[in-house]
Image (cartoon, rainbow, N blue to C red):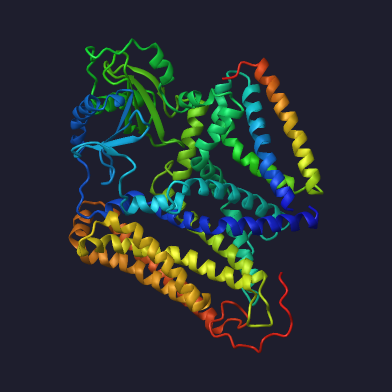
């Protein structure tokens, strides 16, 4: 490759990193934590108990009641099955005539707008990772960030290609700190490249599928894609065609529907007979509830497959299985669609895979952080304490946003546990506490300058993370003892990982302080830089 | 540099949509049978086109060539739509 081409791609890599790096740091840090969504959900609700599987027996009556009160739900109404973590309640979802999604949980007295609900801790961290807490447009922004991330990944590999083999395992500690950071950035980038390719592709798809589908629908497929997409991703035949061919609905005519629990059991039986290792129903929907020809589609998860989601379509009144789209018996569309989710959420393996994704996710966050450090190191003035504005701005933003988001998430965990003691609902406090801490950390970075603020914020994050574990042990020690005695290690795991991460942040704080005190004084990272007489040479931008 | 960037983003988008559409139409068997795999290929393809656009010598050349490629791709798509079964 010509050196001018490499220079061009280096510029592209720098700019894409600048544009997407901060958002990606938050996405990867919060996303890594989300690998343990269910344990955190259990941890966050010490008083809640898992929904009893018998709750599902009441779901049939609830559906009939909803359809009687909301005729629009007859067209299509879904319900979630009880699952292994507390905030996954049994709730029905349907769309009213005006297009608003409604929901009603099994112990709710009535229906309410599905958008009006507060998020618990685990769901909040999960949402943070794909919309940064920005309502409405956040998810699309993250989709664009994913595309920029793909471009950064591609250009990064191209730049590094000439030295790839020679420097694959090179990590050269020594006086040249830029060399060390460059080696660390390259080795993590290359060794976790497959993981990053997966996330660049699936991240863009998960955020932008709807937008891209609408574009393809209009420009390429002449308006026929939307209904085809439904066929390509569900087990039911086209619901629009079903409506057209269904006998005219008659208010008198009301076919009895099999309840969700029974349909789930039938679907599981069919899935196991078709060769799935197992099949745990997690969501089902009725189409044309109560009418002749009504259908049901049960979605469930199977192990020992890349795409865990599978679907079984049944006749909703007789329970006869009509279609199946699950592991081993599905077409290319369903297999691919299911694999997107499996690869992104790391559901195609057991606990060890989730740990691997967690570690790779933190390594990804490090990749973006080290990219920013390299930006600073490349543009550092080596003979003067005063650094150019863009170097100072980058240092402030890196410390404030990256370390600030780590601190904010740890403090949010603490707030979740302390909220009930000040008379607040945890679901009401997690979001404000997270944002207030985040912006306070940024303000602190401006005030203290990045060199000192980095040490402060790392110590604060270390203390907050250790406190997460200790606080839970102190406040809910009885629950910890009970769950461990029952052989469930979710709560203990969250406590110990929080403390371990606190120790890790403490180590980073010590190392950062060492650099601030003893490192090169001609750096933005020097805490007590001797104010060398204002440099007489003008500052040239790199 | 900026001209090439916008050429890659703005003209690369319809070009990649047309290529993915063509691939779906031309695939042997029903168009619908492998539509999702082709759809998944769209974002990576666009990324590669954006990166490849920087290889043009000037911004003007990038715009010109990508415009020609778009015309070609959409012409082929038009033909495919009117001769092949589609969805």
How many dots with numbers?
A: 0
Asked if residue A241 is positioned above or below residue B44 in the image, the reply reads: above
Q: Quadrant of residue A304?
A: top left
At horizontal 38% and vertical 16% (from top left) the residue drawn is A243
Lateral position of residue B7 relative to residue A357, left or right = right
Q: Quadrant of residue A391?
A: bottom right
At horizontal 70% and vertical 49% (from top left) the residue drawn is B5
Asked if residue A252 is positioned above or below residue A215 in the image, the reply reads: above
- Please state which of residues A493 and A289 is positioned toward the viewer in this rendering: A289
> How far from the left and from the top, in percent, is residue A447?
48, 77
- Please state which of residues A534 and A145 is positioned toward the viewer in this rendering: A534
> How far from the left and from the top, in percent, is residue B69?
75, 34
Residue A489 in view, yes or no: no
- Please state which of residues A173 and A242 is positioned toward the viewer in this rendering: A242
> How far from the left and from the top, in percent, is residue A370?
57, 64
> How far from the left and from the top, in percent, is residue A95?
34, 31
- Please state which of residues A114 and B35 is positioned toward the viewer in this rendering: A114
Residue B57 in view, yes or no: yes
At horizontal 54% and vertical 22% (from top left) the residue drawn is A224
Q: Quadrant of the C terminus of chain A?
A: bottom right
Q: Quadrant of residue B21?
A: top right
At horizontal 38% and vertical 54% (from top left) the residue drawn is A125
């Amino acid at each position: 490759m010509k050196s001018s081409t490499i220079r061009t791609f280096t510029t592209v890599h720098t700019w894409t990193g600048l544009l997407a790096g901060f958002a990606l740091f938050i996405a990867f840090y919060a996303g890594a934590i989300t690998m343990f969504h269910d344990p955190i959900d259990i941890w966050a609700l010490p008083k809640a108990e898992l929904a009893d599987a018998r709750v599902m027996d009441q779901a049939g009556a609830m559906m009939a009641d909803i359809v009687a009160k909301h005729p629009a739900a007859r067209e299509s109404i879904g319900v979630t099955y009880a699952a292994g973590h507390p905030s996954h309640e049994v709730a029905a979802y349907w769309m009213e005539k005006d297009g608003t999604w409604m929901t009603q949980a099994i112990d709710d007295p009535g229906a309410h707008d599905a958008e009006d609900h507060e998020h618990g801790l685990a769901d909040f961290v999960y949402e943070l990772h794909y919309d940064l807490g920005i309502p409405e447009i956040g998810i699309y922004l993250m989709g664009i960030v994913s595309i920029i991330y793909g471009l950064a990944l591609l250009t990064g590999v191209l730049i590094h290609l000439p030295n790839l083999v020679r420097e694959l395992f090179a990590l050269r500690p020594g006086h040249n700190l830029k060399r060390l950071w460059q080696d660390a950035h390259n080795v993590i980038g290359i060794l976790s490249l497959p993981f990053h390719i997966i996330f660049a592709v699936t991240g863009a798809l998960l955020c932008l599928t709807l937008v891209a589908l609408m574009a393809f629908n209009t420009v390429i497929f002449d308006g026929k894609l939307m209904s085809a997409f439904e066929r390509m991703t569900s087990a039911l035949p086209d619901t629009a065609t079903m409506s057209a061919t269904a006998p005219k609905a008659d208010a008198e005519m009301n076919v009895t529907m099999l309840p969700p629990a029974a349909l789930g059991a039938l679907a599981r039986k069919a899935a196991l007979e078709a060769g799935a290792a197992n099949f745990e129903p997690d969501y089902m929907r009725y189409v044309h509830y109560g009418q002749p020809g009504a259908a049901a589609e049960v979605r469930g998860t199977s192990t020992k497959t890349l795409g865990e989601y599978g679907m079984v379509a049944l006749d909703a009144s007789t329970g006869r299985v009509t279609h199946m789209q699950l592991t081993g018996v599905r077409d290319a569309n369903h297999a691919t669609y299911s694999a997107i989710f499996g690869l992104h959420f790391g559901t195609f393996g057991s606990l060890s895979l989730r740990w691997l994704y967690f570690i790779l996710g933190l390594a990804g966050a490090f990749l973006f952080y080290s990219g920013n450090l390299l930006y600073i190191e490349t543009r550092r003035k080596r003979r003067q304490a005063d650094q150019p504005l863009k170097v100072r701005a980058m240092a402030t933003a890196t410390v404030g946003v990256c370390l600030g988001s780590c601190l904010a998430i740890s403090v949010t965990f603490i707030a979740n546990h302390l909220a009930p003691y000040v008379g607040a609902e945890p679901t009401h406090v997690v979001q404000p506490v997270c944002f207030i801490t985040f912006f306070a950390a940024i303000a602190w970075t401006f005030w203290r300058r990045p060199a000192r603020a980095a040490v402060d914020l790392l110590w604060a994050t270390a203390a907050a993370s250790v406190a997460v574990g200790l606080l839970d042990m102190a406040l809910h020690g009885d629950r910890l003892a009970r769950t461990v005695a029952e052989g469930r290690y979710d709560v203990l795991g969250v406590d110990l990982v929080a403390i371990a991460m606190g120790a890790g942040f403490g180590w980073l704080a010590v190392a950062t302080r060492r650099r601030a005190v003893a490192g090169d004084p001609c750096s933005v990272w020097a805490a007590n830089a001797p104010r060398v007489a204002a440099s007489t040479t003008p500052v040239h931008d790199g | 540099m900026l001209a090439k960037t916008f050429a890659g983003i703005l003209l690369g988008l319809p070009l990649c949509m047309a290529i993915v559409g063509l691939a779906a139409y031309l695939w042997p068997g029903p168009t619908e049978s492998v539509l999702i795999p082709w759809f998944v290929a769209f974002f990576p393809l666009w990324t590669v086109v954006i990166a490849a656009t920087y290889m043009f010598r000037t911004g003007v050349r990038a715009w010109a060539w990508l415009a020609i490629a778009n015309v070609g791709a959409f012409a082929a798509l038009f033909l495919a739509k009117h001769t092949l079964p589609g969805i």
